[in-house]
Amino acid sequence: HLTGRYSKIELYPFSFKEFLQFHHTTYDRLTSSLKAEMLKMFDQYLVNGGFPEYLKYKDKEFIQRTYEDIIYKDIITRFGIREIKSFKQLTQFLFTNFTKEISYNSLKNILNIKSPVSIKDYIGFLQESYLVFELFKYDFSLKKQFIADKKIYVIDNGMRNNLAFYFSEDRGRLLENVVFVELKRRGKEFYFFKDKRECDFVIVEKNKTVAAIQVTQHLKKENEKREKEGIIEAMSRFKLKEGLILTDYQDDELIINKNKKIKILPVWKWLLTF
């Protein structure tokens, strides 16, 4: 038996800062020309992700091999999964429908898997291998957290886009996934909030909710009311004076009821603030 202290280090694909360093791009002082370059680099990061080998060689087979190795060697062989076809279908479904709410029972019916317990176990195996993550709905009751629907996120946008169909309208979901992984990288405890409206992320520190973040591609007439009401409801629920809406490119500030403030920032700028 080995005893003693140890440190656990979780290594994620490149952050946006690391991505810029990898491409020898400065981000300390942004002139107009550098900002244009920054936006171009962020577009690449958002779609291609942060796996160093893939970024270096642009070899799509590398992503596929990495994925297959994790599926077969780290999960199927290790956990003795017999329903291999169903397990692979579940994984593909989760990668395709990332950032959406799921329930074990609905997945059981969609994929014709024997029981929701199997779904729960399979997703647990995927989480242990850092391919996907579940995000729980915020609730004071742990029992209600476990029972409620979860949201699914994936480890890397580049891997997701190489394994599932990618459409231009997925950009908002890619932004949300990048923010999720960054919060994981920063070691935050966080949930999604849903009551009458929904807020993508609420951050908890020492049993107190300290921040609310909403992610959307654009704030426009069609979605502005929904996005604002979601974060305002979270701010009111947790008595927060300030909220944050992350978008593709908008940069603004809103004053709500004279005493509450919502900052609006581009995701790329937020990624450089830590």
Image (cartoon, rainbow, N blue to C red):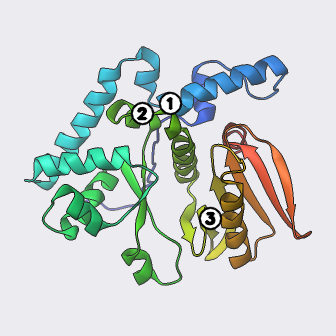
Q: Nearer the viewer, residue 257 or 1?
A: 257
- The label shown at residue 184 is none
User: Mark 1 sits on what residue?
Assistant: 47
Q: Which amino acid does label 2 sit on?
A: Tyr
Q: Is residue 111 above or below residue 206?
A: above
User: Mark 2 sits on what residue?
Assistant: 166
User: Mark 3 sits on what residue?
Assistant: 203
Disc 2 secondary structure class: loop
Which residue is rendered at x = 12% and y = 46% of the image? 85
Residue 14 drawn at (x, y percent): 52, 34
Which residue is rendered at x = 63% and y = 48% of the image? 216
Foreground mark, 1 or 3?
1
Mark 3 or mark 2: name the one nearer the start of the chain: 2
Crowdedness of circle 1 by 10 Å Cα count: few (<14), some, many (20+)? Answer: many
Horizontal side of 44 relative to 51 (left or right) equals right
Give the Cα separation between the discs numbered 1 and 3. 26 Å
Placement of the N terminus among the 4 image quadrants = bottom left
Which residue is rendered at x = 56% and y = 71% of the image? 194
